[in-house]
Image: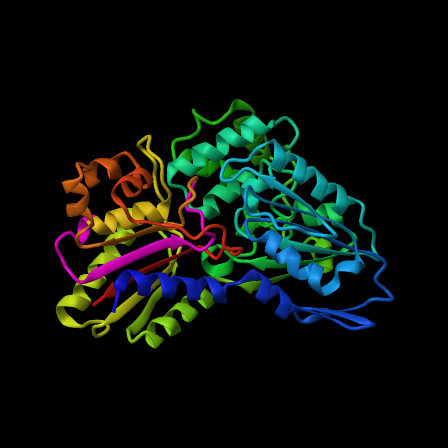
Amino acid sequence: MSSPADAEEIFRAAIAAASTYEAMTASIERNSKTLRISSLSFDLKKTKRIFVIGAGKAASSMALAVEDAIGPLIADGCIVTKYGHGRGLRYMRVIEAGHPLPDSKGLAGSRELLSIAEGAGSADLVLCLLSGGASALLPAPAPGLTLKDEQRTTELLLKSGASIVEMNAVRKHLSLIKGGLLARAAYPARVLSLIVSDVVGDDLSTIASGPTAPDPSTFADALSVLKKYGLISKAPPPVLKRLKDGAKGRLEETPKPDERLFRRVDNFIVANNSSALEAAKAKAEALGYNAIILSSTITGSVHDTAGFLSSVALEVKKTGNPVARPACILMGGEPTVKVAGRGKGGRMQEFALECALRLKGDKGVTVLSAGTDGTDGPTEAAGAIVDSDTVRRAGMMGFDAERFLKNNDSYNFFKKSGGLFMTGPTGTNVMDVMMAIIE
């Protein structure tokens, strides 16, 4: 057995199972009279026009599947995705934009999506394709705010250690498109969203900041997030003013579940982290490992979650619990990093570096942690692969793993000492996969 090679093969099996193109193709069926999307059917004679809009790291692959199924029926469409993640489309425009920090291209894309939605009528169908990353890719500043206000607030939240639910509670209340507002813009058109989940628990109001889902959060909730993470004094004054005004009832809230517009809206999950982990488990077993999925809902700090996986791996090595060797332990989810240093990296590279320090000297354990979208943080790496000798090898080259970790500089640690895991854009985005292989 070759643990690093096996780990890579197991990860790629997870990616294949979460293929957005395959998931979308299975969700759409058309004949001469009817269009079936998921569990719903639409009479093509009664549907005046079909518009396709969407955003996210996987949105372009999703749109390609839609074009292959119903291309000539599309009246107009636009997709916003991350730089380098676009695909050639025939019936829709593709706009590549900034992620994780929003930029002017994303702002232009948001305006296009809103324009299409607002132009739809009651006899039209608006098909919305959403995947992780759409929150950053669709900046649409509310009145009184600028793109720079959104950029600064996003940057503060990313470095604070706030969870994705907390981050999106804030972003939804600074936007004209998030938190159900895209669905409101399209009303009274029929809206159907197909969604690739990158959120623990598949919460529709959190994925992509829920542009077509009811928003249970409030201005007061958003304000409390800034207070919790000490950002009140750091947030742009216009952001703080908007949240305070909203909390006092001076501004209209985001759409809530009882609003009638949601009678015209359906949201369906087409792929998620659980499906990826199940495929990874099957591949591990086919390679001869005893495999176990610990959880698909991992959250919390990278420091704690990396410690948890490392501890379980060492327990397996020592006692054979909770699974006998050779073993493959799998976890999925989205842990968070509180950035205190000035280095470069992503949560999965930092996760791997944390594990490397904990596994130092314990031979026979390999860890791979990577983002399923193929890009971990603001880097071109998906994640990293480490083993019990990673820290020693780096030390022989003059690289101190603990110093790099303290500076949140995992990318440069692995770039210099070896261990970066590269996949390129995968066309999907179902959070992170973390695994430990015990020989």
Q: Is residue 266 visible?
A: no
Quadrant that contains the C terminus: bottom left
Q: Quadrant of residue 145?
A: top right
Horizontal arrangement in the rendering, residue 311 relative to residue 75 (left or right): left
Q: Which quadrant, please, contains the N terminus?
A: bottom left
How many numbered callouts?
0
Q: Is residue 368 magenta?
A: yes
Q: Looking at the image, can residue 63 be seen?
A: yes
Where residue 329 appears, x then y in whole percent?
Answer: 29, 66
**Residue beneath the point at 79% across and 71% down:** 34
Q: Nearer the viewer, residue 191 or 109?
A: 109
> Looking at the picture, does residue 6 appear above or below residue 108?
below
Residue drawn at the location 65% of the way across and 52% of the way down: 212
Q: What residue is at 31 percent from the left and 72 percent from the top? A: 291
Coloring scheme used? rainbow
| Residue toward you, 224 or 153 | 153
Q: Position of residue 76 (x, y in %)?
A: 77, 50
Q: Which residues are magenta?
A: 357-377
Q: Is residue 11 left or right of residue 249?
A: left
Relative horizontal placement of residue 109, taking residue 82 as reference (left or right): right
Q: Position of residue 208 (x, y in %)?
A: 56, 49
For residue 279, above or below residue 110 = below
Q: Nearer the viewer, residue 136 or 21?
A: 21
Was residue 79 drawn as part of the magenta stretch in this picture?
no
**Place of residue 251 in the rendered image (x, y in percent of width and height, measured from the top left):** 64, 34
